Amino acid sequence: AKESGMKLLFVVACALFVLCTFDNADSSAYDKIVAHSRIRARKEGPNVCALQQVMGTKKKYFSTCRNWYRGSICGKKATVLYECCPGYMKMDGMLGCPAVAPIDHVYGSLSIVKASSTQNYADISKLRSEIEGPGSFTFFAPSNEAWDNLDATVRDALVSNVNIELYNALHYHMVNNRLLTKDLKNGIKVTSMYNDLDLHINHYSNGIVTVNCARIIYANQIATNGVVHVIDRVISTIGNTIQDVIEVNDDLTTLSDLFQNSELLEKLGQPGHYTLFAPTNEAFEQLGSDVLERIQSDKQALKALLSFHLLDSIQCSEGILAGTSYETLEGNNIEIGCDGESLTVNGIKMVRQKDIVTTNGVIHIIDKALVPDSAKQVMELLESSQSTFTDMVSELGLSGGMRSDAEYTLLAPFNSVFTGELHTDLLRIILENHILKNKIVLGQLYNGQQLETIGGKILRVFIYRSAVCIENSCLIRGSKEGSNGALHLMRTLLKPAEKTMYEILTENGGDHSSYFSMWFHSHPTLCGFLVCNCFNGCPQANNTVKVNSVQVPEADMMATNGVVHFVNKLLYPEGKTFIQFLSYKSVKKRDNCKYLIAVNAVLSCRNPYWIPGTPDGSDEAHLLYSI
């Protein structure tokens, strides 16, 4: 037992050493994904990798954990395959892939990785002798399917002039230096063997490696004179910038004009690593002429609109396996995902043409314009969940009265808040309470701040540990900032404070007010709650708020000097004994309610257990308590 325990300890120590060594090695995201695939297939034998193949296609991936456990890639179901890991091969009668793949020159290696079409074209183009001879090459070899998928006209043109066009095309797939996947860093450019033109490398965190947006599907086949990587498409030379492409594309004339007017067009002609989601002319027409004209007349809104279509990184379609959020040059994020063979933006299939590779990035042509909040007017920030508020503001003419040169803030309640019918005049007042005169974004709100509505009312801001509230209503996540205003989503209708706490209590308590009068005149500033206890006939609400397990039937009665909450039981301090109520000489009633002061209901700012005395000789109810 002791010996077996020592063996187990030794195995664990070796495993930890290997893991630590691997973690510290100079490995790439691709190498790590392959290593994980090897671990998933360990039951199949040595040097076996688990891959996912999208059903109905020949596309296979060393998959990320997220796609692996979902059993899908780009929303399409994927089956699991077990194949020899790169560099290994099977042996008859043996489990797994125990044999190391043979090493040959680059030409011979093309046969090993089953790139027979590329090998054949290398033979007829007189490239064979070069890649059989001395040197250190990297060959990005198109797969057989890649050649099959190449436009027939292009392929025929290459084959009809094998000594020049085909030879040059193959040379463009080669680098005069051995580069393994760990050397193919994201965003680098490597010089091809055709006219020293650049190849654009992208190495994504999900393990995908692309060359001019063609995905490496089999990597690191070591050769005696270099290395072979198999790619999924035939790549062509690039010499145009993003600016060059959109200036000559007839479907992008509106986009080109907008970039010219915004003074951003030259940026697209400069070196960089950009992704442009380019809306077609029809996409801009869908916005409507009035919206497009308004945006064009506002240079800041125009720049925001165009910058929202730009990423400061190259995102090839083959590098997208699942929805991921990316920051645009406008500052806000968009989500790029995939649905089968289609790219999606913010969950919508809108990419008409993908992977137009340029010297400074990649273009995806889309059939819908992306409009950021910063290019919208404040009323355009409202969504369907606030449609009732939107309709009411429009019907009463409040939105029409908003000046184009002024700024506003909307405090918009959700549709569910509006129940029942209200008189037009009262409804106008309520809606005016939800529109501020100035643009106030979330980060500008602070405790004690006073905000003026378009109706002239003053609203107060309260900042709590986990909430930002304006009067009785707290903000819900989802604030937005537009070109001429801001939008905040509210839990309930706002009730501006128009009365003092004294006035609220006397209004609810009828003539029984002398005790309250003494109290508030002596201590006008209260730092806690004033709670009115009702025995019968109290107003009922949803009963979701509790104080010391006591229901709060009606909460948030906003006063100019505090807030009143009604509770349905008497409150008293924990550990203190409520004794009795003395005689009531002439307790007056209203609506079947007796209003009493709870012992711990009012807290002074200096002493949380301060309770005011009762004037001698009064005929009001007296409350005894013990400390």
Image (spheres, rainbow, N blue to C red):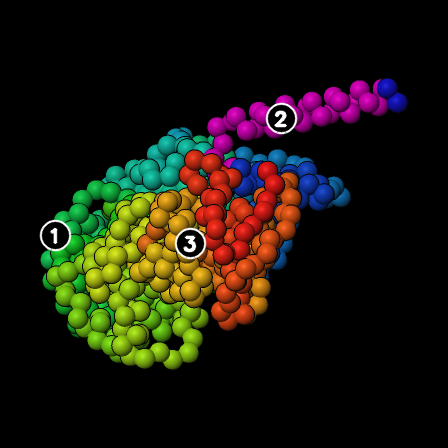
State the CA–CA distance, disc 2 to disc 3. Answer: 78 Å
Q: Is residue 395 visible?
A: yes
User: Which is more N-terminal, label 3 or label 2?
Assistant: 2
Residue 8's place in the image compared with 508, above or below, is above
**Which mark is nearer the camera, 1 or 2?**
1
Indicate which label's residue lies in the foreground, 2 or 3.
Answer: 3
Q: Secondary structure at mark 3?
A: helix
Front-most of residues 412 and 322 = 412
Q: Quadrant of the N terminus?
A: top right
Queried whether the magenta region covers residue 340, the answer comes back as: no
> Residue 293 location in percent, x, y?
14, 68
The magenta span reads 3-31
Magenta stretch: includes residue 19: yes
- State the CA–CA distance, disc 3 to disc 1: 67 Å
Q: Residue at the location (48% across, 44% down)?
A: 613
Three-letter code for the amino acid on which mark 1 is drawn? Glu
The residue where tag 3 is placed is: 516
Residue in the image at 71% along x and 26% along y:
12
The kind of secondary structure element at disc 2 is helix
Circle 3: residue type: Phe
Q: Which residue is mark 1?
A: 263
**Residue 589 versus residue 7: which sits nearer the camera?**
589
Q: Nearer the viewer, residue 155 or 523?
A: 523
Where 21 falls versus 623 (above or below)? above
Q: Do tag 3 and tag 1 residues touch (Cβ < 8 Å)?
A: no
Tell me the element at label 1: loop
The residue beneath circle 2 is 18
Q: Earlier in the sequence, mark 1 or mark 2?
A: 2
Q: Is residue 160 left or right of residue 209?
A: left
Amino acid bearing label 2: Val
Of residues 503 and 226, the one drawn nearer to the viewer in this rendering: 503
